[in-house]
């Protein structure tokens, strides 16, 4: 008997406890689209007292939480995946 269970939400919840880098990596590994991943990342940062600098001309959103800073972006319009750099 094969058990088919999706643990994505559990992995995201666990990653929240590890910090910004772990949470963003969990979003990326979950295959989030750019906009969905960015909305979840923004909510996580704001809920934890961080700040969000929305997209400028370069299309990069900067997330700041404690001592961490992440730059979230979509490098190509035809690839709808969540990317970030710490």
Image (tube, grey):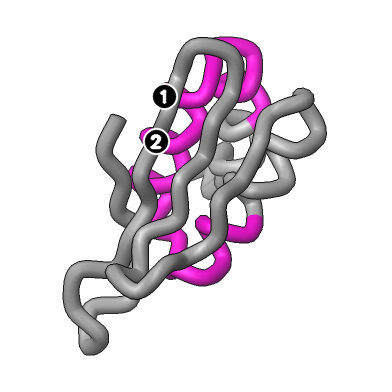
User: Residue at image x 30%, y 53%?
Assistant: 83
Helix, strand or loop at mark 2: strand
Label 1 environment density (alpha carbons within 10 Å; few <14, some 14–19, many ≥20): some
Label 2 environment density (alpha carbons within 10 Å; few <14, some 14–19, many ≥20): some
* In-image side of 13 versus 62 (left or right): right
Instruction: Compare residues 7 and 60 and report the one nearer the observer.
Output: 60
* In-image side of 71 versus 32 (left or right): left
Image: 58 above or below 79: above
State the mark number for residue 70. 2
Per the image, the residue denoted by label 1 is 21
Image: 50 above or below 28: above
Helix, strand or loop at mark 1: helix
Viewport quadrant of the C terminus: top left
* In-image side of 65 versus 72 (left or right): right
Q: Which residues are magenta?
A: 13-39
Q: Residue furthest front?
A: 57
Task: Give the percent coordinates (x, y) of residue 13.
Answer: 67, 28
Instruction: Compare residues 51 and 77 and report the one nearer the observer.
Output: 51
Q: Is residue 67 magenta?
A: no
Image: 64 above or below 33: above
Task: Give the percent coordinates (x, y) of residue 52.
Answer: 61, 46
Marks 2 & 1, CB-CB < 8 Å contact: yes
């Amino acid at each position: 008997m094969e058990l088919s269970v999706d643990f994505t939400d559990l992995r995201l919840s666990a990653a929240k406890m590890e910090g910004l880098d772990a949470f963003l990596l969990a979003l990326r590994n979950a295959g989030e689209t750019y906009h969905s991943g960015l909305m979840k990342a923004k909510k996580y940062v704001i809920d934890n007292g961080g700040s969000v600098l929305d997209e400028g001309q370069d299309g990069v959103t900067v997330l700041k939480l404690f001592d961490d800073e992440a730059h979230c972006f979509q490098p190509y319009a035809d690839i709808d995946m969540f990317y970030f750099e710490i």
